Image (cartoon, grey):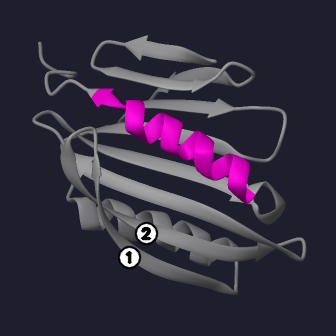
Amino acid sequence: MSRIYQTDGLRFRYPDEWRAQEESGDEGLTVTVDGDGPAFCTITLLEGRPPVDEVLDAGVDAYREVYEDFDVEPVECQVAGRAARGRNVDFFCLELVSSAWLRAFRTGACTVLIVFQSEGHDARDAQSVFELIVDSLDCESDVFAG
């Protein structure tokens, strides 16, 4: 079973046992969903529609500042019915290989950034949660209109 997060312009499914937290800031709305384990997902709606590659590069740079040893793989994909780009980042944290999947695309009103992070031993479960969220994501283009 899954729960539904919904606000003006954003809707997605996430696991029943996870919780959602919403935060509005200068750049836009950020929703974080997480459970009891180390995996989490953030979805940020960036006002001003910054370029997708700029957003992804900033995300990778944030990992680069914290972790010395990591690999980055570019990804082309579809999210919410739109062409999207992403980066898969594998890094070492406390002697475990951890992964982060970054995806970004633009709507008529914002740039959407999705960051999902998990530890290595949770990879299979994390992948299914990531797919649940991404496959169910619906971003209305008028989220910041009016």
Location of mark 2 (residue)? 87
Q: In which quarter of the image is the N terminus?
A: top right
Q: In this view, does 31 lie above or below 67?
A: above
Magenta-drawn segment: 123-138
Residue 93: image location, x then y, percent: 81, 71
Determine if the magenta segment contains residue 53.
no
Indicate which disc residue 84 carries.
none
At 29% from the left edge and 59% from the top edge, which residue is drawn? Answer: 77
At 10% from the left edge and 35% from the top edge, which residue is drawn? Answer: 108
Instruction: Name the outermost residue toward the right.
Output: 94
Marks 1 and 2, how far apart at CA: 5 Å
At 42% from the left edge and 13% from the top edge, which residue is drawn? Answer: 6
| Residue type highlighted by circle 2 | Arg
Near-viewer residue (79 or 142): 79
Q: Quadrant of the C terminus?
A: top left
Determine if the magenta segment contains residue 125.
yes
Residue 22: image location, x then y, percent: 54, 22
10 Å neighbourhood of mark 1: few (<14), some, or many (≥20)? few
Q: Are marks 1 and 2 in contact (CB under 8 Å)?
A: yes
Near-viewer residue (23 or 4): 4
* Left or right of 115 in this view: 74: left
Location of mark 1 (residue)? 74
10 Å neighbourhood of mark 2: few (<14), some, or many (≥20)? many
| Residue type highlighted by circle 1 | Pro
Residue 26 in sight in this render? no
The tag earlier along the polypeptide, 1 or 2, is 1
Q: Quadrant of residue 52?
A: bottom left
* Left or right of 26 in this view: 109: left
Q: In this view, does 17 lie above or below 117?
A: above
Residue 142: image location, x then y, percent: 14, 21
Residue 66: image location, x then y, percent: 69, 72
* Left or right of 121 in this view: 52: left
